Amino acid sequence: MSWRSLSRTRRIELAMPWLVTIGMLVVWEVGVIAFKVPSFILPGPVEVWQALVRFNGPIWQHAGHTLFTTVLGFAFAVVFGVLLGVAIGSSRLVYNGLYPVLIGFNSVPKVAVVPVLVVWFGIGTVPAVITAFMISFFPIVVNVATGLATVEPELSDVLRSLGARRRDILLKVGLPRAMPYLFASLKVAITLAFVGSVISETVASNEGIGYLMIQASSRFQIPLVFAGLVVIAVLGIVMYVLFALVERRFTGWAMRGTQSATVTTGS
Amino acid sequence: MTHPFVHLHSVSLTYAGAEGGSGTLALDGCTMGVGRGEFVAVVGPSGCGKSSLMKLVTGLVPPSRGSIEVANAEVTGPLKIVGMAFQNPTLLPWRTTLQNVMLPLEIVEPHRSRLNRDKAAYVERAKALLATVGLAGFEEKPPYQLSGGMQQRASLCRSLIHEPDLLMLDEPFGALDAFTREELWGVLQEVWMERRFTCILVTHDLREAVYLADRVLVMSNRPGRIVSEHTVSLPRPRTLETTFSKEFVEITHRLRDEISRVRKGLDPVAAAPEQAA
Ligand SMILES: Nc1ncnc2c1ncn2[C@@H]1O[C@H](COP(=O)(O)OP(=O)(O)OP(=O)(O)O)[C@@H](O)[C@H]1O
Ligand SMILES: [Mg+2]
C-alpha cells in the first residue's frame, strides 16, 4: 500500500494525528513566546526538546527502567486478569462473590496504597510493579468476564448439541468470543499501567521517569520535568499502537463492523 | 414398529416469562414417535413450537412435563449422537467455513481423538461435503462473506460431517431459491438413503416435507402438539418428476387444507357431527 495509491481523504485521515500534534506544539511555543512565560513555569517545546537532548543519557536509562516496571506489572495483570475474568465470566457463583469486592478494590486510589507497599517491600521496583499491576488489572478482568458472560446462547447451543463438555464450550466458543474484549482492554490497561508505575516512582523510588521528574522539579529544572512527561506520553502511545496492531491481527472477524468492546476505568 | 428410536410422551414446555409475567406455553401434551432410520417431517403454523420441539429432543431444553426418550434412554441433557442444523446458521464468526464444518469432529468421539492423526483425510471429507452443496471454493472464507443461503448450506454440512445417528434439521433450506432448494432435496435424500440415519425435518414447505419424508406430522397452533400424521409411501429415490405425480399432489393438498384449518384453531379434519356441538 503506497502513499500515492491512497485516496485524498484517506491521506488526510492518516496525516491528521501528526498535523494536530504539530499544530499543538506550534500554538504552545508561540504562546510561551508571546506572553513571555518564564521557563520555570512553562517551558516551550523547543526548550523541552533541548532538555531531552541534553539529558538524553539519564532519560534513556530511567525510561528503560519505567518501561520494564510497567511491562512487568502489566504482564502480571494480563495473566491474573484473564484467569479471574474467566472464573467470573463463567460462573455465577464466583461472579456474585467477587464482583463487589473488585469494585471496592478498584475504587481505592492507588497513590494511597503505595506507602503501604513501601512498608512491606521497601523503596524501589517492587512497589512500582505492584501499582502498575493493580491499576491495569481491573479493566482486563471486567472485559474478559463481559465477553464470556455475553456469549450468544445460540453459539453455545451449537456445541452443547454435540454433547460438548463445559471445558470444550469455554475453549471453542467462550474464549474466542472474549478475545476482542480482551484486546480492547489491553490497549487501555497498558496506558493505565504507565500511570501506576510512574505514580509509585514519584513517591517511592530512586529510579525511573517518575523519580527523574521529582528530582528535576525539586531543582527547578522544569524543562526536564516536561521532557519526562513527553517520554511517558510517547511510551504510552507506542505501546497502545503495538496492542492495536495485535488486536487487528487476531480479531479481524470482530472488526469488520463497528462493534468494538471496551470498558474503561479511571485511575 | 417396535419401540421407537425417538419417543415423546405428552411433553409440555413452558418458557419462563419476564419477571412477574406469566410464561409462554410452547408445547402442550405433545406425543410422537420416530422409528430408527425413519425420515419424519414436522409441519405447522409459525410459532407453534417446532423449533422448541427440536431443542427438546436434543436435550438442549428440559421439558416442563412429560418425558422424552432417545435410543431407549431418557433424555436428561444434551445428546452425543445428534447432528443439528438450527433455524439460524449460527456459524462461529472467528472460524473459516471449513473450520466451522469441521467443528463437530473436534468434539465428537471417535473423530476427536483421530482428528490430529488423520487431519488430511478429514479435511478432504469436509471439502467433498461442501462441494455437494455447491460451496466448493468457499472453504477459506469467513461466514460473514457468505450469503444467508450459503451459510445455511454450510450449517447443513456441519450437522452431517460426523455422521450422526440422529439428524435434526430446522428449516435448513428456508433461505434458498426454489432451484437450489430442489437440488438440495436430492442431495439430502441421497445422503440419507446411503446412511439411513434417523432424521427429523422441520419445514414450512409442504412439497419439501412430502418429497423427503416417510411420514409427515402436522402440529397445531401454539401450544403445539401433533394433531395428524400422513404416511408417504412414494417409492425412492424420489425425483422432481415424483412431485408432479397424482399421489404427491394429493398429499400436499390435504396437508395444506389441514394446516389452514389448524391455523384458525380448528380441528385438522372437518369435524364429525357429534364433535361439532
Ligand atoms: N427462548 C424463548 N423464551 C421465551 N419464549 C420462547 C423462546 N423460544 C420460543 N419461545 C416462544 O415459544 C413459542 C414457540 O416458538 P418456536 O421457536 O418453537 O416456534 P416455531 O414453530 O419454530 O416457529 P417458526 O416456524 O416461526 O420458526 C413462540 O410463541 C415463542 O414466542
Ligand atoms: Mg422455528
Image: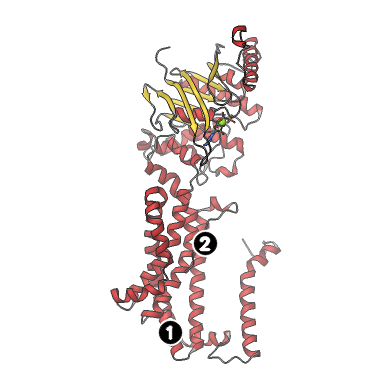
Q: Residues within 10 Å of mark 2 (few under 14, many from 20)?
A: some
Image quarter of the C terminus of chain B? top right
Q: Secondary structure at mark 2?
A: helix
Residue at 59% from the left image edge and 10% from the top image edge: B275
Residue B223's disc is none
The image quadrant where one finds ligand 1 is top right
Q: How many marks?
A: 2
How far apart are labels 1 and 2 at the CA level? 32 Å
Task: Name the chain under label 1.
Answer: A
Does residue A133 sit above or below B101 in this rendering?
A: below
**Residue at which label 1 appears:** A214
The answer to whether any part of residue B115 appears in the image is: yes
Residue at 63% from the left image edge and 22% from the top image edge: B263
Q: Secondary structure at mark 1?
A: helix
Q: Position of residue B162 (x, y in %)?
A: 43, 31
Residue at 65% from the left image edge and 30% from the top image edge: B177
**Residue at which label 2 appears:** A244
Chain-order first, disc 1 or disc 2:
1
Q: Is residue B269 left or right of residue B123?
A: right
Q: What type is the residue that disc 2 sits on?
A: Ala
Q: Nearer the viewer, residue B273 or B108?
A: B273
Task: Name the chain under label 2.
Answer: A
Q: Position of residue A48 (x, y in %)?
A: 54, 85
Q: Nearer the viewer, residue B27 or B236?
A: B27
